[in-house]
Amino acid sequence: MSLPPCPQCASEYTYEDGGQYICPECAHEWNETESAAPAVEVLDANGAALQNGDTVILIKDLKVKGSSMVIKQGTKVKGIRLQEGDHNIGCKIDGSAMNLKSEFVKKA
C-alpha cells in the first residue's frame, strides 16, 4: 500500500496512525479527505507557479532578520515548501530554517 506524500514538505516518509497521516519530517498531520494542494497559488517574481519541492534562486540580496547575515543574490534553494502567510516559502539555507517571500525568488 502506497501512502501519499506530505502536502506540506513533500516528504515520502509519511505513516498512518488511526485514520490520520503523519509526516515525521515536519510533523504535519492530515486525513485522507483533505486536499493535497496548497490553499493558495504561489507565484515567483516572474509569475511562474511554484510547488512543494521546487528549486528556486534568489534574485536579490536578503538580510536575515535578527542577524548580521546576508543571503546573496543567486543562492540556489532546493526543496522548498509552500505555506500560508506573508513569507510563503519555507526552506533551509545552509542548514538553517528560513522563510522567504516568493517575490524575491525565481524558479530554477
Image (tube, rainbow, N blue to C red):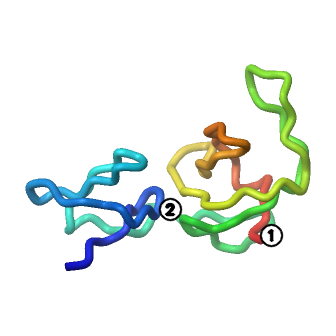
Which residue appears at 67% of the width and 66% of the height? 43
Q: In this view, does 46 lie to the left or right of 100?
A: right
Q: Quadrant of residue 4?
A: bottom left
Q: Which of 19 and 11 is in front in this view?
A: 11
Q: Quadrant of residue 21?
A: bottom left
Real-space CA distance between mark 2 and mark 1, rounded to the nearest whole angstrom: 17 Å
Where in the figure is residue 106, as x and y percent of width and height? 79, 65
Amino acid tagged 1:
Asn
The residue where tag 2 is placed is: 40
Q: How many labels does the image show?
A: 2
Which residue appears at 90% of the width and 45% of the height? 72
Give whichever of discs 2 and 1 has the lower sequence position.
Answer: 2
How many residues crowd mark 2 within 10 Å: few (<14), some (14–19), many (20+)?
Answer: few
Q: Is mark 2 on a helix, strand or loop?
A: loop
Where in the figure is residue 45, as x and y percent of width and height? 79, 63
Q: Quadrant of residue 63?
A: top right
Q: Which of 108 and 85 is in front in this view?
A: 108
Amino acid tagged 2:
Val
Query: Image quadrant for the N terminus?
Result: bottom left
How many residues crowd mark 1 within 10 Å: few (<14), some (14–19), many (20+)?
Answer: few
Where in the figure is residue 24, as x and y percent of width and height? 34, 49
The residue where tag 1 is placed is: 46
Which residue appears at 55% of the width and 44% of the height? 85
Which residue appears at 64% of the width and 42% of the height? 99
